[in-house]
Image (spheres, rainbow, N blue to C red):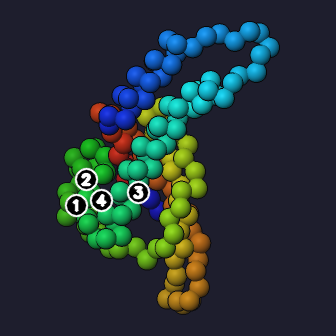
C-alpha cells in the first residue's frame, strides 16, 4: 500500500567518543554489557529517529493534518507533487486502529518500518481485520523522510 537531525550528529559524536575511549579486551574475553550497548547505540538512535518521524506522520494523518503529513514526505516527492495532490491521494483519514511498530530494519540511509493496524470493512463492520503497513524512510540532509512513490 505505502512504501514507506541533529540526533544523527549527536549519535556520531557519541560513537566517536566511545571509540576513542574503548580498550581492547584480551583475546577470548566476552564483551561486556557497555561494549555491546555502545555497538548498538547508532542503530538504536537511528531507529528512534525513524520511529519518531513515523509517529508524527501517523498522528498527522489520523488528525487530518494534511500539511504536516506532507511536510514529512521526501524532498523528491514534494518536488514533483503538490500539497493538493498529496491531499487527493492521502488526505482521507484512514480507518485504522493500533499502529504498533513491529520492526525497523535499516541499511545505510534507508529504513523499512513495519506497523500493525486493525481495520474493518463495510461487509463486516464489527470485525477487526489485522493488516501490516510497510513504510520506507530515507535520510537526506540529516533528516528522515517517508518515501512515497
Seen from this angle, which residue lies furthest right? 28
Look at the numbered discs 1 and 4 and tell me whether their residues touch, using CB distance below 8 Å.
yes
Please give the residue where the numbered disc 3 appears in the rendered image.
55
Q: How many marks are shown on the rendered structure?
A: 4
Left or right position of 6 against 1: left
Please give the residue where the numbered disc 2 appears in the rendered image.
71
Q: Is residue 11 visible?
A: yes
Q: Residues within 10 Å of mark 1 (few under 14, many from 20)?
A: some
Task: Identify the image quadrant of residue 81.
Answer: bottom left
Please give the residue where the numbered disc 1 appears in the rendered image.
67
Which residue is rendered at x = 53% and y = 61% of the image?
100
Distance between mark 4 and mark 2 Cα atoms = 5 Å
Look at the numbered discs 1 and 2 and tell me whether their residues touch, using CB distance below 8 Å.
yes
Q: Is residue 140 visible?
A: no
Please give the residue where the numbered disc 4 appears in the rendered image.
69
Q: Secondary structure at mark 3?
A: helix
Task: Work out whether mark 3 precedes mark 2 in sequence or the reverse, and give the earlier one.
Answer: 3
Look at the numbered discs 3 and 2 and tell me whether their residues touch, using CB distance below 8 Å.
no
Q: Secondary structure at mark 2?
A: helix
Which residue is rendered at x = 43% and y = 77% of the image?
95
Q: Is residue 32 above or below residue 144?
A: above
Amino acid at each position: 500500500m505505502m512504501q514507506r537531525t541533529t540526533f544523527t550528529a549527536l549519535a556520531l559524536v557519541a560513537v566517536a567518543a566511545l571509540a576513542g575511549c574503548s580498550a581492547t579486551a584480551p583475546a577470548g574475553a566476552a564483551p561486556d554489557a557497555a561494549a555491546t550497548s555502545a555497538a548498538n547505540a547508532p542503530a538504536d538512535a537511528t531507529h528512534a529517529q525513524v520511529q519518531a518521524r513515523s509517529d508524527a506522520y501517523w498522528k498527522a494523518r489520523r488528525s487530518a493534518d494534511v500539511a504536516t503529513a506532507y511536510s514529512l514526505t521526501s524532498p523528491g516527492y514534494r518536488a514533483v507533487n503538490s500539497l493538493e495532490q498529496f491531499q487527493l491521494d492521502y488526505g482521507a483519514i484512514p480507518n485504522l486502529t493500533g499502529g504498533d511498530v513491529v520492526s525497523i530494519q535499516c541499511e545505510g540511509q534507508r529504513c523499512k518500518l513495519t506497523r500493525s493496524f486493525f481495520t474493518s470493512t463495510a461487509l463486516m463492520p464489527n470485525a477487526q481485520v489485522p493488516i501490516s503497513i510497510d513504510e520506507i524512510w530515507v535520510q537526506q540532509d540529516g533528516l528522515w523522510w517517508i518515501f512515497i512513490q
